[in-house]
Image (cartoon, helix red, strand yellow):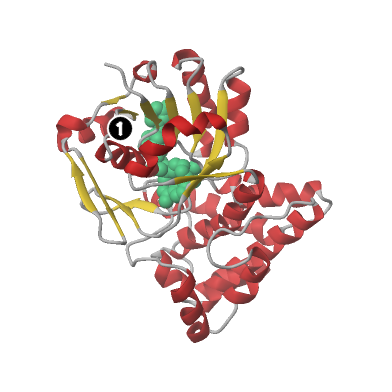
Amino acid sequence: MNHSIAIFGAGSIGAYVGAALIAGGADVVLIARPRSCERYVREGIAISDLEGRREHIDAARIHCSADPAALADAGLILVTVKSADTAAAAQALAAHARRDALVLSLQNGIGNADTLRAALPGMTVLGGMVPFNVVQTADGRFHRGTEGQLMAEASPALATWLPAFAAAGLPLSERSDFAAVQWGKLLLNLNNAVNALSGLPLKAELSQRDYRRCLALLMEEALRALAASGIAPAQIGGVAPRRLPTMLRLPDWIYRRIASASLKIDPEARSSMWEDLQAGRRTEVDYLNGAVARLAQRAGLDAPANRRIVALVHEAEAGKGQAMAGAQLLAALRA
Ligand SMILES: NC(=O)c1ccc[n+]([C@@H]2O[C@H](COP(=O)([O-])OP(=O)(O)OC[C@H]3O[C@@H](n4cnc5c(N)ncnc54)[C@H](OP(=O)(O)O)[C@@H]3O)[C@@H](O)[C@H]2O)c1
């Protein structure tokens, strides 16, 4: 069978975007681990969002394979594995993808599209950005708990595919300043580690000033490193990057008022880093806070709070330590 769109790594983002594309009428094949595929083709895939969308894609409409050869006919390949798996995904694409296929990385972090490009000479590889958050609920639904529009590096190669994203209810906008977009998103992703260590849903975590102070500290280091490197991060969401630390440090009652106007988060939303810790998986912390520490070092600066939170998340990956209260985490980051 010919599948026009392939999703490589159908976990939270891949299954959500893939199911939305199928609901919109696209011909999609999911590449996933055997246990995920078995579930998708047995039960179908249910998706929901904070605006009240709820959809179930019947099992009969799901095409899923653990064998990357199944993407051989795809004209568009969305890469949705975690950053540590990008190099392996790139090898699979090099072996099986059509040379004229468009590859779009829908991953966080800075270097994933470059990793794919290096392994896929001659192919068009674009960076993409997913601004919203998706987690699996206890009943197996893929739930989008925050808002925002997909973005990608501007390219004429995207034109064919934009209608499929629009029909999926996930309109994709093109950005000519994509490096700035990626760094703007990475600033927000610095909260993933804070959220994972808090053990709380995003909304509950961000409603506590001490956790927000932790995030403000991490963002300030990143903003300093970016400024020293001549990078101006793009604004993702309602607040300009340079204003984020000040906003985060506001007392709870003022923050709540501003946040409710600029940021919609439902009570189910959590960071995928929290999910990784729960599942005993390696997290992306080296690609997020670690990227800030590396950028600072290259600019002759230090980013000690980001370095410390990387170490804390690695301890949590090793099963050491419990959820940290805001004041405890703040003290550890300032130590
Ligand atoms: N979740 C979010 O809210 C969110 C939001 C914005 C951006 N992102 C970014 O999107 C990317 C994906 O995140 P995610 O949360 O969707 O991750 P995820 O739930 O872990 O999904 C990735 C899936 O790909 C599978 N996989 C990895 N290598 C594979 C291979 N060679 N063949 C088949 N399957 C493979 C993984 O299986 P194993 O776990 O067994 O390896 C996992 O099921 C990350 O860069 C993340 O930062 C996530």
- What x and y, as percent, mark residue 299? 82, 50
Hey, which residue is sitting farthest right in the picture? Answer: 300
- Relative to 56, 80 lies left or right: right
Residue in the image at 33% along x and 37% along y: 18
Secondary structure state at the residue bearing disc 1: loop
- What x and y, as percent, mark residue 260? 44, 75
Residue in the image at 59% along x and 52% along y: 186
The answer to whether residue 85 of the structure is visible from this angle is: no
User: Which three-letter amino acid code belongs to the residue tagged 1?
Assistant: Ala
> Badge 1, how many Cα within 10 Å: few under 14, some, many 20+?
many
- Relative to 216, 162 lies left or right: left
- What x and y, as percent, mark residue 100? 50, 17
Please state, as top left, top right, bottom left or bottom right, where the C terminus lies in the image: bottom right
Query: For this rendering, which residue is in front, 24 or 237?
Result: 24
- What x and y, as percent, mark residue 183? 64, 51
- Relative to 151, 142 lies left or right: left
Residue in the image at 50% along x and 57% along y: 192
- Is 175 placed above or below 78 here? below
- Is 96 placed above or below 258 here? above
Residue labelled with disc 1: 26
Please state, as top left, top right, bottom left or bottom right, where the N terminus lies in the image: top left
